Amino acid sequence: MSKDNHPDTADKKPPLHCKPLKPYYLVPIFFLTVIAVYLIVQSRSSENLHVNYLMTMDTSVELRFTGGSSKEAVLIREDVVHEMELLEALFSRSIAGSDVSLINNSAGLRPVRVDSEVLYVTERAVIYAGLSEGAFDPTIAPLIDLWGFLGQNYRVPTAVERIKSLPLVDYTLIEVDEKQTTVYLQHQGMSLDLGGIAKGFIVDQALQVLMTAGVEHAFINAGGDIGLIGSKPDGSPWRIGVRHPRDEEKIIAVLPAIGGAVVTSGDYQRVFEEEGVSYHHILDPETGLPARELISVTIIAQTAIEADALSTAVFVLGSTRGMALIEQLPGVEGILITPELEILVSSGLVNIVELYP
């Protein structure tokens, strides 16, 4: 569906598997059409709207914001990109000398002193791992590598290989020392992968750069992790279309949104096929196999770091346990889609979301 198409609100909606509306302010965002959700344009008002498309962190980034002259907008854009690239240099385990690569190289040997941002994100990762009972686990890297998802050298590992790697995936073996500002993985062979949470943090920090510059209306889409400041420039909510997980030309739900973050995890994002079976990158840390109970999870939260971690956690937990986790967290809502294309909506979205199954 193109960005200029405006979906009509359905007169009749299918039953929603959810509870009464939660009384809190909805916080959402925008998503690349090729990844998870569509921005549904409602008006062509673009006064002082600066639109940028760029590549950074090895991903496509769309940045839109209002205010200031063209010259000022260029400086703001440069500041945003600079911040994102600085943080990527800390978090990427593919970059030699990054804090995360140093942690991994020292696993089972010694703690590593890290930047304050890395310390913070690692602490948050451990918290979300605990909340999800390990469904989100930042030590998933050995399994990711076993499947070849990092370098896109895809392969289906043997059961013996998976079983051998499973003991290395255990978030409780991460030691974070706030006083010494160090992170330590207790066993050799362990490896930290903050990809399921760091991009959300980077988006949040990019938004902070924009707000510091006085921007009042903006969204940033960094490869599918989205952050939003305020409403659209004309004062109306953004309308966010969630991609149909089995047809990238269609949307399956639309959300009106003001501020916050939206992140979608889907089984169609990094996927390969072998002997007629599709395998995706969202692995269950307990089994080392792709999680299969859901095919798409969209999380709406107040920050991108929270939405990022929870989208993975809920995907692995499945519909029942995943929705239970969403409902217990204030300021968090979700849209879950099963393999049968059943749409499950959390209580705070009952009277808000428009469904197009």
Image: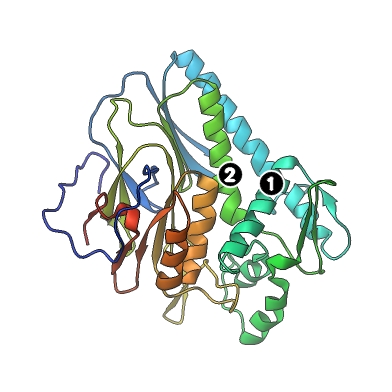
Foreground label between 2 and 1: 1
Q: How many marks?
A: 2
What x and y, as percent, mark residue 101?
A: 75, 54
**Residue, disc 1:** 120
Q: Residue at x 20, y 42 (%)?
A: 5
The image quarter in which residue 170 lies:
bottom right
How busy is the neighbourhood of tag 2: few (under 14 within 10 Å), some, or many (20 plus)?
Answer: many
Separation of disc 2 and disc 1 at Cα?
Answer: 10 Å
**Residue, disc 2:** 201
Q: Which residue lies furthest to the bottom in this view?
A: 160
Q: Residue at x 67, y 36 (%)?
A: 86
Q: Residue furthest left?
A: 11
Answer yes or no: is residue 57 visible.
no
The image quarter in which residue 323 lies:
bottom left
2 or 1: tag closer to the N-terminus: 1
Q: Which residue is drawn at 35% across and 52% down?
A: 22
Callout 1: SS: helix
What x and y, as percent, mark residue 113?
A: 83, 47
The image quarter in which residue 28 lies:
top left
What x and y, as percent, mark residue 357?
A: 22, 62
Answer yes or no: is residue 37 visible.
yes
Up the image or down, 64 lies above or below 147; here it is above
Q: Residue at x 44, y 15 (%)?
A: 68
Asked if disc 2 and disc 1 are in contact, CB closer than 8 Å, the reply is: yes
The one nearer the camera, 334 or 287, is: 334
Badge number at residue 282 = none
Q: Is residue 220 found left or right of 128 in the rendered image?
A: left
What x and y, as percent, mark residue 195?
A: 60, 54
Up the image or down, 150 lies above or below 83; here it is below
Q: Is residue 334 found left or right of 72 in the rendered image?
A: left
Amino acid found under the numbered disc labelled 2: Phe
How busy is the neighbourhood of tag 1: few (under 14 within 10 Å), some, or many (20 plus)?
Answer: some
